[in-house]
Image (cartoon, rainbow, N blue to C red):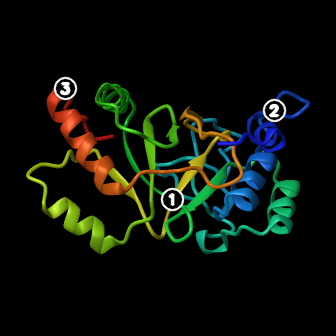
C-alpha cells in the first residue's frame, strides 16, 4: 500500500505543546477514511476518574458522546474543525456501523492472549484499539440480524465479549479519557483509503477458539 506521508503525520504526530493532535486525527478519520466522528464528553476536571456528564455512575467516563449526541456524527471537515476548535481536548468518538467499521471488544489481558494466539495461526487482523481496560478489534459493518445468527450458532460465547455495531460508538486514538489514554495496539497502515478490516464472523470464530484453547476465562469487565 502506498504511504501518504502527509496523512501519516496528521494521524500520528502530536501538537507543538506535546499534547495529542486530536483535530488532526479526527480529520483523518472523517475526511480521508469517511468514518463519522464527533467529540466526546471530557473527564470531570474536578475528579480525573469521573465523567463530565451528569451521570454519577457513568460506566465509560470521558469516552462517550453527550453534547452533541451520537446522531450528530459527521465526515464534514468544516464541522470537525469547528468542534475541535472549540473543544481541542475532546476525545474522538467513532459512530460505529453504516459507513464505518464496527468492533468486537474484550478485556485487555484476554485480548492480548487472544491476539497472540491469532498471530500464531497467521490470521490477518486490521486495526486494534486499546484502552487500559479493553481492546477493540475493528471489523466490517454488520447487522444485528447477522450478529444474532452468528452468536446463536455458537455453543459458547464469553460473556465479556462486547459488540459495537450500528448505533454504537468507540473512542479512537489519541483520545484521553477518565480511564486513561486510547492508543493503537495494532495501528492502521497509512494509505489513501480507509484501513482494511476483517469480517465479524472470522473475528468472533477466532477469538472464541483462541480463548477456549488458551484457557482464558475472560472475566466480565
Image disc number at residue 101: 1
Query: What percent of the width, then of the height, locates residue 137?
Result: 43, 45
Label 3 Cα crowd, 10 Å radius (few <14 / some 14-19 / many 20+) = few
Separation (CA) of disc 3 from disc 2: 38 Å
- Tell me: 91 left or right of 58: right
Residue 12, quarter of picture? top right
Q: Which residue is mark 2?
A: 14
Q: Which residue is mark 3?
A: 214
Query: What percent of the width, then of the height, locates residue 129?
Result: 52, 40
Which residue is pictured at 57% across the width and 37% down the height?
Answer: 49
Residue 115, quarter of picture? top left
- Tell me: 105 left or right of 188: left
Separation (CA) of disc 1 from disc 2: 25 Å
Asked if the residue under mark 2 is in contact with the one under mark 1, i.e. CB atoms within 8 Å, the reply is: no
**Total marks in image:** 3
Residue 214, quarter of picture? top left
Query: What percent of the width, then of the height, locates residue 177?
Result: 62, 41
Amino acid at each position: 500500500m502506498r504511504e501518504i506521508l502527509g496523512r501519516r503525520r496528521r494521524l500520528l504526530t502530536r501538537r507543538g505543546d506535546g499534547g495529542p493532535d486530536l483535530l488532526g486525527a479526527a480529520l483523518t478519520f472523517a475526511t480521508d477514511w469517511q468514518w463519522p466522528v464527533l467529540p466526546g464528553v471530557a473527564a470531570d476536571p474536578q475528579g480525573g476518574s469521573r465523567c463530565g456528564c451528569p451521570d454519577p455512575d457513568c460506566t465509560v467516563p470521558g469516552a462517550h458522546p453527550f453534547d452533541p449526541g451520537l446522531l450528530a456524527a459527521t465526515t464534514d471537515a468544516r464541522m470537525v474543525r469547528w468542534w475541535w476548535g472549540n473543544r481541542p481536548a475532546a476525545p474522538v468518538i467513532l459512530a460505529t456501523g453504516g459507513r464505518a467499521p464496527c468492533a468486537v471488544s474484550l478485556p485487555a489481558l484476554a485480548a492480548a492472549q487472544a491476539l497472540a494466539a491469532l498471530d500464531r495461526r497467521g490470521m490477518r487482523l486490521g486495526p486494534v484499539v486499546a484502552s487500559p481496560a479493553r481492546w477493540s478489534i475493528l471489523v466490517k459493518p454488520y447487522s444485528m440480524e447477522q450478529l444474532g445468527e452468528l452468536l446463536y450458532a455458537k455453543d459458547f460465547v464469553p460473556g465479556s465479549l462486547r459488540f459495537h455495531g450500528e448505533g454504537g460508538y468507540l473512542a479512537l486514538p489519541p483520545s484521553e479519557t477518565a480511564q486513561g489514554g486510547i492508543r493503537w495496539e495494532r495501528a492502521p497502515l497509512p494509505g489513501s483509503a480507509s484501513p482494511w478490516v476483517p469480517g465479524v464472523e472470522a473475528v468472533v470464530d477466532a477469538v472464541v477458539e483462541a480463548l477456549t484453547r488458551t484457557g482464558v476465562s475472560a472475566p466480565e469487565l
